[in-house]
Image (cartoon, helix red, strand yellow):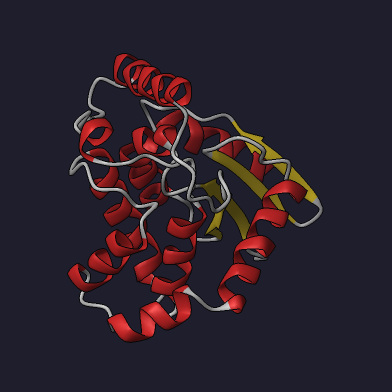
């Protein structure tokens, strides 16, 4: 049977992706054997050293509160906003995921989770290269190789390729799920509470092909 692909478009510093992460684990665990799961980095915010404007900081904090209301199990450490110097910059964290996966496919997910925990639970700033290097060490990666790949033009090119693929899939907001089976393509509505509804829809769609 030809492999269908379920694409997951995300950003490691996307707060709704963090809220979705427990359900995502259940979703991937329940996928049919003939469905391949592929993660794509969406690259929410390009590199900048400029401080995040106060108005944007407030908006993002309100988003965190809204997520906590929508998904009561979602945790956020608001100390981040006083202990760190926020920047609207997520590309570095995306490149860190690519650099980690170069040392083993499983490190894609592990680095993403480490970035989320650092940002949302530990009040550490994944926009800072120093934080990303610390996380690589905590994951017991080859840190020298990680730094080399993190800063390489090829890593930025791979990020841009994945962002372009997200655009081609019309995954313009994150998280996003897109099922592709041959020439057929469907956007799967995100359920932040239960994987069952999404798994049922996947089965129904695959049965029509």
What percent of the width, then of the height, locates residue 148?
43, 83
* Residue 60 in sight from this viewpoint: yes
Q: Nearer the viewer, residue 111 or 84?
A: 84
What percent of the width, then of the height, locates residue 55?
46, 20
Name the image quarter holding the N terminus: bottom right
Does residue 188 lie above or below 110 as drawn? above
Does residue 198 lie above or below 43 as drawn? above
Q: Nearer the viewer, residue 116 or 78?
A: 78
Question: To which quarter of the image does residue 130 belong?
Answer: bottom left
What percent of the width, then of the height, locates residue 109?
37, 60
Does residue 59 lie above or below 177 as drawn? above
Q: Nearer the viewer, residue 17 or 205?
A: 17
Does residue 41 lie above or below 58 as drawn? below
**Is 63 left, or right, of 114 in this rendering?**
right
Seen at 20% across and 32% down, the residue is 77
Q: Nearer the viewer, residue 87 or 170?
A: 87
Q: How many marks on residues?
A: 0
What percent of the width, then of the height, locates residue 22?
30, 39
**Is 32 left, or right, of 79 in this rendering?**
right
The extreme front residue here reads 50
Seen at 34% across and 43% down, the residue is 26
**Is 127 left, or right, of 43 in this rendering?**
left
* Residue 103 in sight from this viewpoint: no
Seen at 63% across and 63% down, the residue is 3
Seen at 34% across and 47% down, the residue is 25
**Is 181 left, or right, of 133 in this rendering?**
right
């Amino acid at each position: 049977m030809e492999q269908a692909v379920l694409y997951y478009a995300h950003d490691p510093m996307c707060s709704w992706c963090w809220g979705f992460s427990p359900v995502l684990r259940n979703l991937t665990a329940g996928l049919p054997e003939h469905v391949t799961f592929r993660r794509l980095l969406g690259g929410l915010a390009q590199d900048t050293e400029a401080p995040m404007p106060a108005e944007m900081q407030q908006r993002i904090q309100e988003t965190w509160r809204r997520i906590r209301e929508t998904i009561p199990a979602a945790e956020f450490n608001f100390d981040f906003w006083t202990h760190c110097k926020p920047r609207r910059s997520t590309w570095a964290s995306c490149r860190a995921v690519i650099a980690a996966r170069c040392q083993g496919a499983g490190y894609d997910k592990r680095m993403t989770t480490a970035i989320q925990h650092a940002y949302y639970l530990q009040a550490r700033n994944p926009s800072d290269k120093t934080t990303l290097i610390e996380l690589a060490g905590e994951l017991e990666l080859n840190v020298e190789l990680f730094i080399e790949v993190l800063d390489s033009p090829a890593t930025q090119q791979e990020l841009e390729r994945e962002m372009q693929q997200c655009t081609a899939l019309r995954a313009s907001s994150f998280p996003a799920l897109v099922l592709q089976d041959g020439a057929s393509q469907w956007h799967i509505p995100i359920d932040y509470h239960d994987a069952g509804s999404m798994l049922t829809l996947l089965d129904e769609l695959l049965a029509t092909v």
